[in-house]
Image (tube, rainbow, N blue to C red):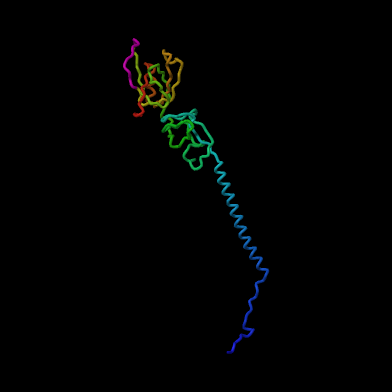
Amino acid sequence: MTLRTQPASAITPRSPEPASTQPRQRLRSIDSRLLAGCALIIGSIALASIVMGRAGHTTSVWIAARDVPSGVVVTKSDVALVSANLSQSQGQYVLESQPVLGLRTTHDLAKGEFIPGSALRSVKPTSLRLVTVPVEQFHAPAGLARGDLVDVYINSTNDSGLSGTASLVATRVAVHSVEDDGGTFGASSGSVGVVLELTRESVSRVVSGTRSGSVDLVRVPMDQS
């Protein structure tokens, strides 16, 4: 059997890879891993800073400074400002930059409660007037308080001083406040001054009535309010 051999010139020897290129490839591989690791660390630090910043961010928000009943106009003594971290619920509550005074409550607010925007509605500036009427002892319901609704009656007197017919002069009037006047409003030492929220149309009837007779306030039951 005859063995055929290729001439030496037909075999192309493979050139060995220069030794100098191997460290370069290793360096490039190390550099890419190092850059990726640095980017990951920097991203983690930035994310942590954002989270911590949000967690420590507080906002001035309005709360009820005392129990505030539904249907009353908010005054300075009803509210206070506190700093709180509301996070995602910030849009639900009334912030310092938003108005609260002069707005009417739509439901009861408990002392210390954050005031939600849905709990307040606007009142036309010219729609209501605050009028103080003198009410003698036993001519108003016991425990009458701010936020109650009352009907206003006037017991007129004739020339002889005898009481005449009681007349209904205003209905479903909100009580703004009740002030003990120390007896200066009437003969009874138990008389008080009751501040009523009256429409412009009813102011003249109520004021005239207080000049012609005594005032009786009748509470409107809650299930009718």
State left or right for residue 66 relative to residue 31: left
User: Please, which residue is most extreme toward the right here?
Assistant: 20
Q: Nearer the viewer, residue 120 or 37?
A: 37
Please identify the quadrant where the N terminus is shown: bottom right
The segment highlighted magenta reads 159-168
Question: On the image, which quarter does residue 37 sit in?
Answer: bottom right
Say above or below: 78 vs 40. above
Instruction: Looking at the picture, tell me which residue is in the foreground, 97 or 56.
Output: 56
Residue 205 in picture, x, y percent from top left: 37, 22
**Residue at the outermost top position:** 160
Q: Residue furthest bottom?
A: 1
| Residue drawn at (49%, 28%) of the image | 77
Q: Position of residue 221 (x, y in %)?
A: 35, 26
Rendering coords of residue 220 (x, y %):
35, 25
Q: Residue at x 33, y 22 (%)?
A: 168
Say whether residue 32 is left or right of residue 186. Answer: right
Q: Is residue 161 magenta?
A: yes
Q: Main secondary structure of the magenta part?
A: strand
Q: How many marks?
A: 0
Residue sticking out furthest to the left: 165
Instruction: Give the image location of residue 92, x and y in percent.
Output: 46, 39
Is residue 58 left or right of 102 when viewed as pictured?
right
- Image: 87 above or below 157: below
Q: Residue at x 38, y 26 (%)?
A: 149
Give the quarter of the figure containing the C terminus: top left
200 to 188, vertically: above or below:
below
* Residue 160 among those drawn in magenta: yes
